[in-house]
Image (cartoon, rainbow, N blue to C red):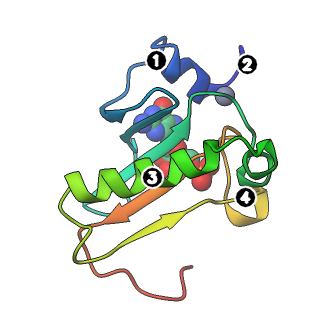
Amino acid sequence: MTDCLFCKIVAKEIPADVVLETDRTLAFRDINPQAPMHVLVIPKEHHANAAELAVADDGLADDVLKTAHEVAVREGVAETGYRVVFNTGPGAGQTVFHVHAHVLGGRNLTWPPG
Ligand code: 5GP
Ligand code: ZN
């Protein structure tokens, strides 16, 4: 997608602080972190949101979750706990319509979220 911010990050047209790259996923630090560790995990292929990623049904959603967990391990929060969030739709706060998992950790995360 030519006009998608995260597709441009995948294409390296926009720089990002990449923490992990696999053949089908990319993980990079959020520009406006909401926790000491706040990384976004995306499929390199464009899908607008988690629902569209799920129906792609080719294992890509699994890959995104596996990368999210690997990021948590590498960042040292897998044992203490971390949160994976897919904001889906504008009412849930989604602002970038290339699906991304927020991986948050490094502080006590309260529930329910805001
Ligand atoms: P959403 O609101 O769609 O769930 O999450 C979008 C996230 O992307 C936000 O947390 C925002 O801070 C982050 N973001 C927006 N633009 C950029 C950017 O250019 N680079 C990076 N690394 N993160 C971005
Ligand atoms: Zn995209």
Q: Could you tell me how far apart the alpha carbons at marks 4 and 1 are, in whole angstroms?
A: 24 Å
Q: Which residue bears the numbered disc 3?
A: 66
Q: Which residue bears the numbered disc 2?
A: 1
| Side (left or right) of 99 relative to 81 | right
Which badge, 4 or 2, comes first in the chain's sequence? 2
Q: Could you tell me how far apart the alpha carbons at marks 4 and 3 are, in whole angstroms?
A: 20 Å
Q: Nearer the viewer, mark 3 or mark 2?
A: 3
Q: Quadrant of ligand 2?
A: top right
**Mark 4 secondary-structure assignment:** loop
Which badge, 3 or 1, comes first in the chain's sequence? 1
Residue at horizontal 49 percent and vertical 22 percent from the top: 9
**Mark 2 secondary-structure assignment:** loop
Q: Could you tell me how far apart the alpha carbons at marks 3 and 2 are, in whole angstroms?
A: 24 Å
User: Is the CB of the residue bearing disc 3 within 8 angstroms of ligand 2?
Assistant: no
Image coordinates for residue 31, horizontal then vertical, percent? 39, 41
**Residue 88, numbered circle:** 4
Residue at horizontal 23 percent and vertical 78 percent from the top: 80
Q: Could you tell me how far apart the alpha carbons at marks 1 and 2 are, in whole angstroms?
A: 14 Å
Judge by depth and name the residue closer to the eye, 22 or 8. 22
> Would you say residue 33 is visible in this rendering?
no
Q: Quadrant of residue 99?
A: top right
User: Is the CB of the residue bearing disc 1 within 8 angstroms of ligand 1?
Assistant: yes
User: Is the CB of the residue bearing disc 2 within 8 angstroms of ligand 2?
Assistant: yes
Image coordinates for residue 50, horizontal then vertical, percent? 71, 53
Which badge, 4 or 1, comes first in the chain's sequence? 1
Amino acid residing under circle 1 = Ile
* Callouts 3 and 2 close, C-beta under 8 Å: no
Image coordinates for residue 19, horizontal then vertical, percent? 29, 37
Mark 1 closeness class: few <14, some 14–19, many ≥20 residues within 10 Å: few
